[in-house]
Amino acid sequence: MKLNKELAELYYNAAEARKILGIDEEAFQYWGRTGRITRTHLPGRKQAVYSKKEINNIASRIETTILAEKSSEIAYRKATVSDMYQENELAKIIFGRGGDALEARQAFLARNPDCDYHVYDKDKLVAYINVVPLKHQTIIDFLESKIGNIWTITTDDIELFEPGKPVECLIIDMITTPTVPPMQRRNYGAKLLKGLVQSLEEMGKKGIEITKVYAISRTITGIRLLKGAGFHPIETHNKRKNGSLSFELDVLATDEKILHGYKVALAKGKQKAKPVITSPLA
């Protein structure tokens, strides 16, 4: 029996609750009898209803448990040129034709093999991020819309990660697949960020210094994510026609915990890279 609009805001009927939980009728009835879920009997109604808040919380815990059990199948790694086919396909799902840049993606990675990172669930690409070191003026031109599509730049604008050479980076894309439930998508994103932090720490150990990171976003989720990571809007560059906002993260000045390991590793990497000066023999 369907609930009226007012009740439907607070409760599920039995069929709806069972569907949200993903269990069969027998299990659902057992959960009700044993108090694992609360049966609520409203005045004037013969059939019980079920609190949306309670059912959604239980469903979320079930999904979290399932994801935890599957976590061993989720792998983070640095991308290779051959991985660009899957990356390009995922980009097209998100951006349409604007994401179709297979040859450019391959060329970027051939120029700098350390600028692209992937997360796979079994053999399927489910998340990726491009963190590309670029010449300063190229980044500024992109932020100011003088470059419409970053994939159109030449590889001469791409820097290399080299010890003792400070670089600025642009996050071109940070994508998670939209073809899974939100909880699973967040899990993929968390795996990607955790892996990226570890990759940055490895760079820091080698004395690779990233001074600033830039990014743009026009979605509420993307903007919230950037601000949460310590990025600050660049007001002078926020005039893009598509409504997206430009952001900057001063890596060396920020106090964000997520970059603490990188900064500690970088300090040690720089120390190791210093030449040892010995006094001449008398």
Image (cartoon, rainbow, N blue to C red):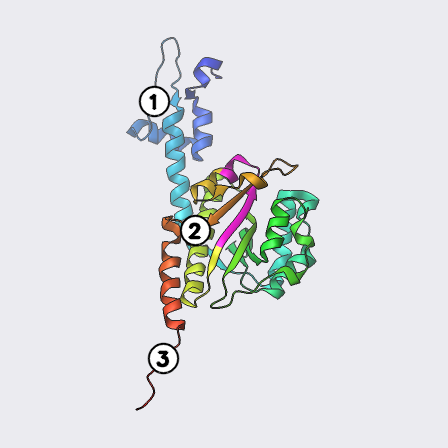
Residue positioned most to the top: 44
User: Disc 1 marks which amino acid?
Assistant: Arg
Foreground disc of the pair 1, 2? 2
In terms of secondary structure, where does tag 3 sit?
loop
User: Disc 2 marks which amino acid?
Assistant: Lys
Query: How many labels, in total?
Result: 3
Residue positioned most to the front: 282
User: Residue 79: x percent and y percent?
Assistant: 55, 61
User: Residue at image x 67%, y 43%?
Assistant: 96
Q: CA distance from mark 3 to mark 2?
A: 52 Å
Segment colored magenta? 212-223
User: Residue at label 3?
Assistant: 277
Residue 4 visible in the current orientation: no
* The magenta stretch spans residue 215: yes
Q: Give me the disc on residue 39.
A: 1
User: Residue at label 2?
Assistant: 70
**Mark 1 closeness class: few <14, some 14–19, many ≥20 residues within 10 Å:** some
* The magenta stretch spans residue 32: no
Q: Is residue 278 left or right of residue 127?
A: left
- Mark 3 and mark 2 lie on one chain; the one further toward the N terminus is 2
In terms of secondary structure, where does tag 1 sit?
loop
User: Residue 258: x percent and y percent?
Assistant: 39, 51
